[in-house]
Image (cartoon, rainbow, N blue to C red):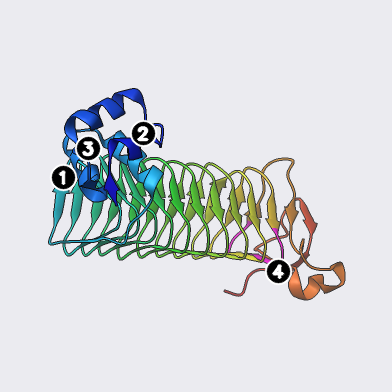
Amino acid sequence: MEFTKQFLRAKSPCANGFRWFVRHVEDGVGYQQALDQLVAAGRVDDALWLLGQFGPSNAVLHLDSLEAEALVFAGTVQVRGGIEVDGVIHVGRSLHSGGGIRAGRAIVAGEDIRAGAHIHSDGRLHCGGDLRTDWGVQVQESLHCGGDLRAAWDVVCHGALSVGASAFVGQDLLVHGGIDCGKSLRVGGHVSGEGSLRAGQGIVVGGAISGLTHLEAGWGIKAGECIHTQGAIKAGESLSAGEDIRAGEGYGIFAGLNVQEPAWEVCAQVWAQQPPAGLRSGVWMGPCAI
């Protein structure tokens, strides 16, 4: 793809950005070259606007390591070592790193993100496909993953967390905003948050679930330790905790919401150390065997 002034004008750019482009970029320049020139001039937001207008490309950038002020690339970026970017790293397709990924403002990929070490963003993280890291993830703002999320260590998110498919976290999941998981959620350690947690399928947590506003799963919910919320607890099928289950004051606990009442003894079992106060549906079976 080659750019000309008339071609760019048809996209209705801002006056300041168009004037800069006319003065500094020659007609017929390639798509990625135009993005590189904008980033080199410190006009990262203009480069992001251009990428948003014309979309991803099939180009692939191979590097041994990456240290930069910012990177806006229309295709896929594959780095053998680590990635350190002071501002934004934004790729139209996939981002692969043999080491860690760190950005001071945002990490954005239209498709998958894969890292061999820790992923850290001082701003937001947006992944259109699957997100996978052999270590953990820490994000100061929101984290969005359009596909599956897999992290071997902790996931810490200071904003909202949304996952389009399933999520697997090897250690703790700590989220200050809401948690929305399209399919199943499996966490090896504890789950703690300040917003609500909703999973379209089941939730399995090795440790405790605590601090959340509301807790809801389309299938069952199981925690190795306690389940404590400030609001309601809703499970489409069974509900199990190694310790106690406690909802917020005045809120109910519901099991078997997605099964018929005659099947509650099989599909809406509630396991806890003692009968939960506020149990509105389901059948308490006694202490959990595991």
- Tell me which segment is drawn in magenta: 235-244
Task: Determine if the magenta segment contains residue 236.
Answer: yes
Q: Earlier in the sequence, mark 2 or mark 3?
A: 2
Along the line of sight, the residue nearer the viewer: 197 or 90: 90
Quarter residue 50 falls in: top left
Q: Is residue 19 above or below residue 118?
A: above
Q: Which residue is mark 2?
A: 9
Q: Which residue is mark 4?
A: 286
Estimate the spatial distance between the alpha carbons at disc 4 and disc 1, rounded to whole Å: 58 Å
Residue 86 is one of the magenta-drawn residues: no
Secondary structure under tag 3 reads helix
Judging by the rendered image, the residue that carries numbered circle 1 is: 68
Q: CA distance from mark 2 to mark 1?
A: 30 Å
Amino acid type assigned to the residue bearing label 3 in the image = Leu
Q: Report, in whole angstroms, how far the alpha carbon at label 2 lies from the one at label 4.
A: 70 Å
Tell me residue 172's x, y (percent): 42, 57
Circle nearer the N terminus (4, 1):
1
4 vs 1, front mark: 1
Q: CA distance from mark 2 to mark 3?
A: 16 Å
Q: On the image, which quarter does residue 135 sit in?
A: bottom left
Amino acid carrying label 4: it is Gly
Q: Are marks 3 and 1 in contact (CB under 8 Å)?
A: no
Characterize the local packing of mark 4: few (<14), some (14-19) or many (20 or more) Cα atoms within 10 angstroms: some
Q: Earlier in the sequence, mark 2 or mark 4?
A: 2
Foreground label between 2 and 4: 2
Q: Identify the amino acid type marked 1.
A: Ala
Q: Residues within 10 Å of mark 3 (few under 14, many from 20)?
A: many
Q: Which residue is mark 3?
A: 38
- Magenta span: helix, strand or loop, mainly? loop
Image quarter of the C terminus: bottom right
What distance separates the C-alpha of mark 3 from that of mark 4? 64 Å
